[in-house]
Image (spheres, rainbow, N blue to C red):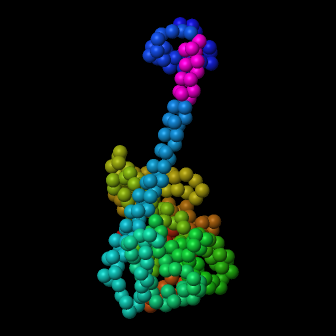
Amino acid sequence: MAELPAKRKRNKVNYDERNNVEDGSDDGTEEELHDEESAAAGGKVEEEEKVKKPVKKKKKKNSVKWNANHLKNTLDQNKLDEEAFDATNSDELMILTSSRAKNQCKVFIKKEFKENLWKFYDWKNTKLPRLDQNGKLYIGNQNDGTFNQHVAKYILSLVEVDDETKAATFEEFKKVAVGEHDTSNKADYRPNVYYLFVHDKTNYFFKSSKKSDRPSVYPGVSWFTRTKKWRVQVTPPGEKPKYFGLYVDEKKARDRALELYDQLYNGDDQILRRCYVKIYNSSGDIEPTFHVAKKMSDLFKIIRKNIEW
């Protein structure tokens, strides 16, 4: 067999296979066939590359699955809340989970809250809110954002801060403030359920690894499977996570983590992380007030009141 040109050496295997299938000849006709085979081979490579690209779409499917579970949690919790619904102090709105969905969900919201909220935005031409794929309430068009954001803006507009230093901090806080729901029902805005605002990154401290078979409810604490101990890992401001030891007792690991958070987030440059707004007063009336916690551990205990500290 004549030696192939250098530029065709990479396709020599295909060339030999083609010769075996045909007649084993080594003339110019086969050279032309080889050219066609090379083109075909090139086409196959392109097809294979196209097949590999959809791997990224799997993440999108996982995201859709996560959203579906989140929405299901909201709907399930909504059914439970319907049974305990107090019509004397709250109002309700029947909404659809989406513009095409048959499932329905109720918004539980205090009457005074709802009436003032509707006046504040004057939604004359806006349909009733619906749930988006994240389980959050959505109202208006895409430029309006979500219903939760409207509620946040309304509540923050009621806050009055007299102190100049706090007022400046509050203006910055409004850019990063997010509302807290005490349950998975993101359609519930009653007192003691939708109860305050915190920095949008505060919840990040409570995220636990999905791979862990024993997730911890405490920030900075996670189960280390290899040693079968509780690991303390805290992220200093602007740095990567740092490891601070292993503990047999989860509560000792919690105490160490809280101590570290108090040390690392205690400066004036971290004051935003310690800010929060209480929406209701002790009587259950809407009276938003702005606060700054002295320590991060104090704030953690406020925003996660269902955790045993």
Q: Residue 184 occupies which quadrant of the picture?
A: bottom left
Q: Is residue 136 left or right of residue 290?
A: left
* Magenta range: 28-42
Q: Is residue 261 positioned above or below 165 on the image?
A: above
Q: In percent of the image, x 58 and y 78: which residue is there?
A: 153
Q: Main secondary structure of the magenta part?
A: helix
Please state the horizontal and vertical placement of residue 32, each as a whole percent of the image. 58, 18
- 199 part of magenta stretch: no
Q: 118 or 24: nearer the eye?
A: 24
Q: Is residue 73 left or right of residue 163?
A: left
Q: 197 or 107: nearer the eye?
A: 107
Q: Is residue 41 visible?
A: yes
Q: Is residue 10 visible?
A: no
Q: In percent of the image, x 54 and y 67: which residue is there?
A: 200
Please state the horizontal and vertical placement of residue 235, each as a whole percent of the image. 52, 56
Q: Is residue 72 positioned above or below 55 on the image?
A: below
Please state the horizontal and vertical placement of residue 281, each as a whole percent of the image. 48, 87
Q: Residue 90 occupies which quadrant of the picture?
A: bottom left
